[in-house]
Image (cartoon, rainbow, N blue to C red):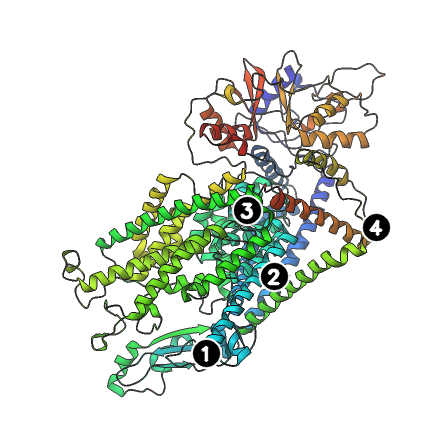
Amino acid sequence: MDQKGYRRGSFQSATSDEDMLEIAGASVDFSMADDDPPLDREMGGFSSYNGGGMNGTSTMMDFLEEPLPGVGTYEDFNTIDWVREKSRDRDRHREITNRSKESTWALLHSVSDAFSGWLLMLLIGLLAGSLAGLIDISAHWMTDLKEGVCLAGFWFNHEHCCWKSNTTFTDRDKCPEWKSWSQLILGHGEGAFAYILNYFMYVIWALMFSLLAVLLVKGFAPYACGSGIPEIKTILSGFIIRGYLGKWTLVIKTITLVLAVSSGLSLGKEGPLVHVACCCGNILCHLFTKYRKNEAKRREVLSAAAAAGVSVAFGAPIGGVLFSLEEVSYYFPLKTLWRSFFAALVAAFTLRSINPFGNSRLVLFYVEFHMPWHLLELVPFILLGIFGGLWGAFFIRSNIAWCRRRKTTRLGKYPVLEVFVVTAITAVLAFPNEYTRMSTSELISELFNDCGILDSSKLCEYVNDFNSTKGDDLPDRAAGPGVYTAMWQLALALIMKVFITIFTFGMKVPSGLFIPSMAVGAITGRLLGVAVEQLAFYHHDWAIFSGWCSQGADCITPGLYAMVGAAACLGGVTRMTVSLVVIMFELTGGLEYIVPLMAAAMTSKWVADAIGREGIYDAHIRLNGYPFLEAKEEFSHKTRAMDVMRPRKNDPPLTVITQDTMTVEDVETIVTSTTYSGYPVVVSRASQRLVGFVLRRDLIISIENARKKQDGIVSTSVICFTDYCPPLPPSSPSVLKLRSILDLSPFTVTDETPMEIVVDIFRKLGLRQCLVTHNGKLLGIITKKDVLKHIAQMANQDPDSILFN
Amino acid sequence: VLFPQAHRMFGQSSRNSVSPVLLLVLLGCALCVPAQASKSSEDIRCKCICPPYRNISGHIYKKNVSQKDCNCLHVVEPMPVPGNDVEAYCLLCECKYEERSTTTIKVIIIIYLSVVGALLLYMAFLVLVDPLIRKPDPYTQPLHNEEDSEDTRSLATVPTLAGARANTVLERVEGAQQRWKRQVQEQRKTVFDRHKMLS
């Protein structure tokens, strides 16, 4: 004990990093050494809790006690120990820095180690950008494949097929090389029979694509379904899900994302692109030791990869970094900010050089108008915000209810049939209405578009008065019949999208949420914009319009209303704030529109928050019971640590291991009879004074290894966690020393500590468990799962829904 | 004493440095193909759309010019209006510079279709052919409930850390495939059967 106390004191006072080696068998007498004490080279370096000081450090210097493979790694569906990982990385870095003074090679090694992070970001950006280009081009082609095929080369989609041919002004979309299916089969494209044939082929293709997608997901990589963002949020907070970011998941997710988007289902590809980018990040981490072995550093890389994913999805690098910061990441150190930006830029640049949209734009609906807006238009913008908030809350409630039904009832037993039925309904309902037949990205692009002279779509069929046109600026005009048709078609499309997305999000194919929400918002915005425009045109003498909207002026831009509506709906569902505004204005290039976008985003967030606290991703995390400790919510109850800790009053006492009196057999019995993931080590059962904490996995691995490799370890061998094991009679079997796997500095709180502080400690330090002491003696343990259950209980939710460890 | 560590670390890092180099080479090849191909002259154009003007109908003009020459005056030929009307007409026209790479598109679509085809074939193989040629799997775990599975897995995975090295390439491939199949089965159970994740 005295040596221990001395050691701890000397940890804090020693300043030099000179590591002395521990000579096998002999133990150094501390009481004489007032210069640098030998540090124990333990695997899984334990940081000094009182901040700073020496760590029991890395194994690399200890040539006697090599780390066992497996010690220090984690089980599947467990939480990592952030403190341990971070201190391991600091030790590694310190060792490399020290060694760099010795030889040129070591210096180069330290320089390359420092640059490995940047090289990794570069590779992630390249890979994410290339995959996004592949997804975009393939999705574009396959979406058009439902309607027809290009005779000049089957790999061209409609737009590229007609690129070279001479199209007339009135028929800009038609060209002889592109044949719709009825034209191909029947030879002509007109008539009822041709329409029915087109309809039939559309539905057949949609069903084929979605069936193929769900079969591939089910057969090869079941983790590839869904959006991926809730699970990535949980992984980034410290949870381990093996295989979720693996090679097969990457391949299957990329392939089936294209299939799912092309099948006409009401889903988007932005959320799955984040998953794809994180898979790239995880796979490329294996190339660098620094990131492969350390789970905390790997999560920094994954944060940056998520930023790259959003950056290629929207063509918004800054928005991507902010999205990663706000929505996805749990800990976001400043170093990660710069690296995420670099990764996002490289990804955006790679995508741009692949050039999927033929005009050097990254996103299909990049619009660039700079029409001014008037302050009075803030009223309809705020109305759009309110609509967005209401729709967001409605969508979250209904989607969670449907997903819960899928989880608990027989509906969940037929995933393939579910996908088939939903696709069939979507395709059958979507084909008649031209606004649902086109892909959702194209719809959004058309809705964002401001009508110019050259636009021949139905939405732009205003009554034109050619004598008064001056250049390209069209004044507000009366709506022609085409606009009225478009309005009710858009209203039908809105209703369909609102309802079908509830059943689509969460199916067993990759599905994103951004594009459908933006579509709902854009349709509503455009409807409102056209309504306001017509109101201003017909009643330009009213007081509210006469000041700024005289006859013949172009004052209302319905495209802007569509944009603001899209932002409002997206904000209502995901509860994004800054990142949403930045993404929207990076999408449109219009810095003038920040104020309307912010007004709508804030209104929608307030309205949605008033109805339900959680965004869609947090709601899915809670639905699945992931152990995610929400970092944004305050814990405001007056409970104390003793109310939450285990064991409770009626439970059997805490399972502990003594430091030097238990045999191998005793420990194995404890390990097999309980399922705890770690055990406190105490001096003796009578005193219950804390020595440290040992993890179950490390115990199992060490004991198995010792039984095989070390001589004389049998079931009656004593396990000793201290440096100085008590002397045993010579006839007893040799002692198994397991000091190297013991964490000497577990976090402790007293039983009177308020739970607010305990929750704060768990959040800020990323703890997995925390020991509770009373008057210096060990009383119980609080794990992260206990904290989550307690929070759920306090919020009157079901504490049994926390499933994972 | 330091040299064994340095040697081991060096060995590790050189093993690691081989794969990034390889990956970079592959990535470079993958990207240089589309980059080279985009220089084909058919894929660059300037497209001007001119709406109906007075009694002239709308027309679309395309011409292969560079980006700075992409405006109405260079592309619209022959000019349908007399000289003093040209400016008014050109104000209505909208000219855009477009470029694309047909080779990139072709390569990407063909890569995608071949990957889908390969996956379909592999799935057909696994479903139809594999059960016929393979004996009952000695590694299939007996059915046990969820609480036990994590424990037994944890105790069982430990010995495999020092597991026997497969002798031939074929055995190694088969071992890897078995492990992968087990992993997919576990994932399928988690997602589809127990609905523990991703519902």
Callout 1: 10 Å neighbours few (<14), some, many (20+)? Answer: few
Which residue carries the number 2 mark? B27
Q: In which quarter of the image is the C terminus of chain A?
A: top right
Q: Where is residue A409 in the image (x, y as percent from the top left)?
A: 56, 42
Which residue carries the number 4 mark? B167
- Element type where label 1 sits in the image: loop
Mark 3 or mark 1, whichever is nearer to me: 1
Kind of residue sitting beneath label 1: Glu
Could you tell me how far apart the alpha carbons at marks 4 and 3 are, in whole angstroms?
37 Å
Q: Mark 2 lies on which chain?
A: B
Kind of residue sitting beneath label 4: Asn
Callout 2: 10 Å neighbours few (<14), some, many (20+)? Answer: some
* Same chain? Circles 4 and 1: no
Specify which label sits upstream in the sequence, 3 or 1: 1
Q: Where is residue A403 in the image (x, y as percent from the top left)?
A: 51, 45
Kind of residue sitting beneath label 3: Val
Locate residue A662 relative to residue B106 in the image: left or right: right
- Element type where label 2 sits in the image: helix
